[in-house]
Image (cartoon, rainbow, N blue to C red):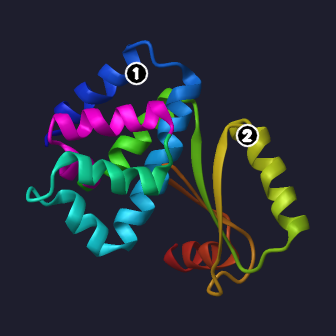
Amino acid sequence: MSSATINDFLQAITSSDTSKDELKNIYSSLVDFFNITSSNKEIKVFLTNDIYDSDSKLSIIKDIVGDSDSSMNFFKTVLDFEILDDLISSHDFFLKKLRKILDRVKIEVFVSSIDDDKKNSIMNELSDIWGSNLEVNFNVDPDIIGGIVLQVEDKFYDGSIKGKIEKFNNI
């Protein structure tokens, strides 16, 4: 599927009578769905194989995402248009666009170590900068000597000691 078709589909579901709460629910279901389909090859093959009927696929999808009406209607539409395989293959793009509509920011945090106090401190700083509608994942990277590296959507911010040393060495 081309980006234009994904954009058209996204615009269709967001310009309809779908409320922000329903979109949040769809987003959450999609995150769960994409996590499963990217980690479980058998489920992905089953869902993208034309041999299996839509009802069987919907049953599996319901087991993954739950029985929310808005999410199940979304997936029924995806199956009706026969674009499930395309949706799976372009999931990063689709989620990014949906986050933008929901004013949500995805941030990957990389640090040398983490505890609850450090998490809370980082979350407070991130909220001051990007607001409270954040999707934050913390990652421990032993290569980071100190400091922090952030990936905010598609942008990287390297505030680590290692990054500063590498920058200094390149001068």
Q: Is residue 41 left or right of residue 96?
A: left
Foreground: 1 or 35?
A: 35
**Magenta stretch, overall SS:** helix
Q: Which residue sits at x=72%, y=35%?
A: 131
**Residue with the mark numbered 2:** 129
Where are the magenta residues, as a range? 68-88
Q: Nearer the viewer, residue 37 or 2?
A: 37
Residue 12's x, y, as percent? Answer: 30, 20
Q: As rendered, which of 101 and 36 lies closer to the eye?
A: 36
Residue at position x 74%, y 71% from top?
147
Assess whether residue 84 is covered by the magenta stretch.
yes
**Element assignment for label 2:** helix
Picture layout, residue 41 above or below residue 105: below
Please say whether residue 103 is visible from this viewpoint. Answer: yes
The kind of secondary structure element at disc 1 is helix
Crowding at dot 1, Cα within 10 Å, few <14 / some 14-19 / many 20+, comes out as some
- Residue 145 in the image: x percent, y percent? 71, 83
Residue annotated with mark 1: 14
Please tell me which of labels 1 and 2 falls first in the chain.
1
Q: Is residue 72 magenta?
A: yes
- Residue at x 47%, y 32% (from the top left corner): 69
